[in-house]
Amino acid sequence: MSTALSAKNKTAFAIGALKKPNDDDPLVNAWIRCNDIVFSWFKNSLSKMVASSILYMTTAADVWKDLHERFSQSNRHKVFQLRKALSVHNQENSSVIDYFTELKSLWNELLSFKPIPACGFTSMKTLIDDHEEQYVMQFLIGLNDSYSHIRGQVLLMDLLPSINNVFSLILQEEKQRGLSNGSTQHLSTSTALVSKTSTGNSNLKGSGRRHEQPVRKDKVICNHCGYISDTVDKCYKIHGYPPGWKSNKNKLSVSGAVNQVSADRNT
């Protein structure tokens, strides 16, 4: 609210620094218009219940003073809350960007209650450096243990980098891990696909061989006549042909055909 008033050059009306002119002053009407504008800003920014309690006030300065007395809180309580939030603030499942953004918000709010005076003395510069070092330490403490290696490298430096430089280092480490994990996952997927394809091709080749050359365990050849699927005990040449029997040349092997021709010549 203070920033909005300053942007509109109306802070003097809120804090009461610009008093109302006398009724015979030619600027009194301009002052009344500006005061009414600021008063309406206050009323529209409040909840309905709180806004109803300021309706009968006349000046914006009275509204500002009343709200400040009712809702302002001691800085010690706010500082305690901020320090407590910082002490338990950890990265956990958040990304480095989200973790640092929330930490920066808490740290800057704490700094607004405990500002460091701008001064050129050496002792003040030491205080500023110490404050910056605490900021970096707070950021490193809240990081996950997976960043312990790079955290140790930062702590071993003679001159501790600024908080923005440390954040940049951790962010680069996070991105590098993301690229490494992506490459590993892609390699594992490719290996699995190649292995699956090789297995499938092997099965297809094996099934093709079985289809082209089926194994017939019951295949026998007669030693006497050379017919397939005959034995000496059932050989038609020895025991005679059954009635209506017709010769099947497909069952006759090469050796059987030779034996047949030799037998016919002997007879």
Image (tube, rainbow, N blue to C red):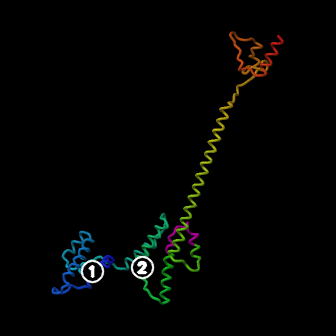
How far from the left and from the top, in percent, is residue 231? 75, 19
Q: Which residue is mark 1?
A: 14
Q: Are marks 1 and 2 in contact (CB under 8 Å)?
A: no
Residue 209 is inside the magenta segment: no
* Residue occupying image coordinates x 44% and y 70%: 102
Residue 141 is inside the magenta segment: yes
**Mark 2 belongs to which amino acid?**
Leu
**Which residue reaches farthest bottom?**
121
Relative depth, front residue between 123 and 260: 260
How far from the left and from the top, in percent, is residue 175? 54, 64
How far from the left and from the top, in percent, is residue 65? 26, 80
* Residue occupying image coordinates x 62% and y 42%: 200
**Mark 1 belongs to which amino acid?**
Ala
* Residue occupying image coordinates x 62% and y 48%: 194
Q: Which image quadrant is residue 243 in?
A: top right
Q: Which image quadrant is residue 157 in?
A: bottom right
Q: Is residue 200 left or right of residue 240?
A: left
Relative depth, front residue between 22 and 226: 22
**Which residue reaches farthest right?**
266
Q: What range of the chain is rendered magenta?
A: 138-151
Q: Is residue 232 left or right of residue 134?
A: right
For marks 1 and 2, give the CA distance: 25 Å
Relative depth, front residue between 32 and 89: 32
Q: Is residue 255 left or right of residue 149?
A: right
Q: Which residue is mark 2?
A: 111
